[in-house]
Image (spheres, grey):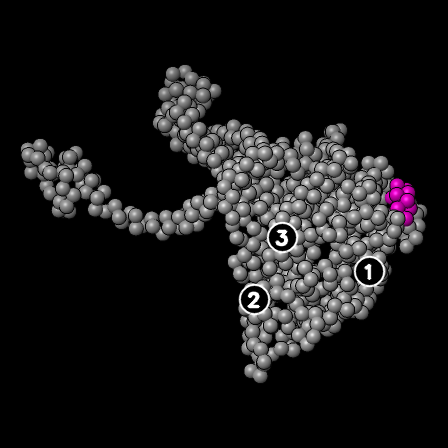
Amino acid sequence: MSVDTSTPAAPVRAKPATGGTAPPGGALTQRELRRRERRFHHRDKWWGYLLIAPAGLGLLVFYLWPVVQTMYYSFTEWGAFGGTTWIGLENYRTLIHDPEVWQSLGNSLIYTALVLLGIPVSMVLAVLLNLKGMRGTGIYRTLYFLPVVTMPAAVAVVWRWLYNGDIGILNQALDTIGIDGTYWVSDPTTVRFAIALIGVWMTVGYNMILLLAGLQGIPQDYYEAASLDGAGRVRQFFSVTLPLLSPTLFFTTVLSIIQSLQVFDLIYLILGGNTQAGLTNPAYADGQTIVMLFFQKSFFDNQRGYGAAIVCLLFVLIMALTALQFRLQKRWVHYG
Amino acid sequence: MRRRSLLTTAATTAATAALTAGCGALTGGSSSAKRRGHLTYGVWDVYQVPAMERVAREFEHSRPGVTVDVQLTPNTTTYWTKLRTACTSGTAPDVFWMNGPNFGLYASAGQFLPLETEGSEAVFDPSDFPSDLVSLYRWEGTQYGAPKDFDTVALWFNKEIFDKAGVDYPDASWTWQDLINNAQRLTDRRRGIYGIAAPVWAQENYYNSIAQAGGHVISKDRKRSGYSDPRTREGLKLWVDMIHRYRASPTLQQLTDTDTTQMFQSGKLAMAQEASYNVETFWADPEFRAKVDLAPLPKGRRRASILHGLSNVVYARTPQPELARDFVRFLSGKKAALTQARHGPAIPARNGTQKPWADAKPRFSLDVHLDALDYAVPYPISTNTAAWSHKEQQWLSRAWSGDESLDSATRSLTRAMDQLLAQEGKARS
């Protein structure tokens, strides 16, 4: 017999299948299941929408709408006290010829690349913490995760002292082994590495926890099978762990890149942007990120239209980089 | 104009949150009041809040039915960002503090109500205040700001370091050459002690030396940069040489890592040029208090000290313009000035009310800061001062660090500043 599956208005009550294909005992047929599913989609979908509406509305009003507005403002000149004039592509023309924009963007990209080096570190830590028989894993997990839950502002204040050229603990330690330390965050040659080290230190814990979750999701059977086949620890890592962890690795990479490109508070405070000495830091131009430049232009130099153009550039760059990663993932990410 | 350090800010925010919370409850009063109403007063210096609260209570007392809420934004950077946003949306405080570098921007955008200075409705009488401060807050012939306080710069020194090196304390007779010679004698690199500090600070350092050398930062008509003037460059050269030639100052990198004032407080500097608003910081530590004193800035071609001061302004879109003006009138009066002198770190601007400020800290020769009025030079400003002072810091720090020659840095600075000033001219016409 045939059941008309195209009528969404069919009675809600499950109709027992009466045809000869129905197995005795009343289990549902594949077809009946599909029919119910579709009916649910048509009739009850609006419930779902209703339930996500508050969150969706918030997202629309406080997130998407400002994004659209920012894009609009990037084509205008915005006075110090409001009042915008449409100037077309003028901001973007200035932007292309502004060496400060490209230097800041370069700084952001270098910072991002250096922070990505933290992912292998997190990976090693996660594998170590996942080893059977490791003691005190709880303590280590907490220790590595602590920087993640610490305010970047507090982190910056502490690291500024550690890095202080005259009285910092780092240089004092180096001094005992006969090395003459430099002024880490006011020396143009070291500033990027000094800051990136803090960036790594701050993100290692977060990535580690994600990777640890990924590791614990790998069924033990694979390792047993591998060892039966004669694979050693190292071989197991590269042939079992790494491929099965690749979705988590992909996720952490995408997230790290987005977060690192948007970094502001940590570097702003490390360079002393909040103090009188900030802008005169000899390493300021070598450390300033693109978001710091946006902040400077928008809120100090009163060029908010131009500031909007700078963040639009960053937006496009992040979109492009993320899209590229999603294309490339097919080559190296294995979904179980 | 000095931005307070992050730690002070963090520490004081909690304290002031409790302070402002208490103010909301103050309402009511006598029904016989001519004017009832509520005013907000925006300030940024946490050290001045006790004095400002006191003045506000005095005003409430003399105007029953009126309440004043002192609103603190305890970080100058945040204060300006917040204020600009509030002005854009029409929600700025009724009365708030203004400084020289920001005044032009707000005045040219019509953010202030004019203040009468003549007749029965006068908010204040200009002859009661130093004329440089009055004119600092006049825009195209109209007075918008009533002078509140002022600050001058002096040469602060650590007596202990002077005694150890056997050098006489600085006095009014000192010239640039004395400053250089003695700074060199006081420098002891092995112990990490320097004669003086040369940070890229405008108000405390190079604006003074530029004036002392006979140069200028900006032309009188505020249309052209003064950085191409050889005398202006001479004023800058003093500090660059102090680092690189005389080696009597820490390098710019050192001064970036450790704040100059902190370095002075930790006994690593024999001398530092400091503005009067830091007196409170030096006074607060009893041990340090006994070690330091101050002298007039050394003479170049002439004697000079940069004069700057804050003013009280009335927001253009205040719902209570008359009451707000009345509050500014009270703030400019003798009573409020004396309260400020006794309880606050700032020197009141009103003539004849400054003595109690100096007497409150008898160990220091604070008269030096007051006497500086006689040879003071007004702080240089234009419409959008912030834009070119940003360029100053960028370019001058390149000369200070030695990455670029002073001549080439000032050439680039002149070009950038002239361009910004030309834009100002266009925007106005």
Residue furthest top as drawn? A230
Residue ID for mark 2: B318
Which structural element holds mark 3? Answer: helix
Q: Disc 1 residue type?
A: Leu
Q: CA distance from mark 2 to mark 1?
A: 34 Å
Cα distance in 3D space between marks 3 and 1: 33 Å
Residue that label 3 marks: B428
**Left or right: where A311 falls relative to B360:** left
Q: In the figure, residue A121 lies in which quadrant?
A: top right
The one of B425 and B295 positioned closer to us in this rendering: B425
Taking the image as shown, residue A9 lies to the left or right of residue A323, namely left
Q: What is the span of residues highlighted in magenta in the rendered image?
A: B175-185
Mark 2 and 3 residues: CB-CB less than 8 Å, in contact?
A: no
Front residue of B106/A249: it is B106
Q: Nearer the viewer, residue B244 or B349?
A: B349
Circle nearer the N terminus (3, 1):
1
The residue carrying mark 1 is B373
Please name the residue shown 37% across and 24% down the image: A222
Q: Residue B242 at x, y = what percent? A: 83, 40
Q: The disc numbered 2 marks a residue on which chain?
A: B
Provide the chain ID for the residue under circle 3.
B
User: Residue B294: x and y, percent?
Assistant: 85, 55
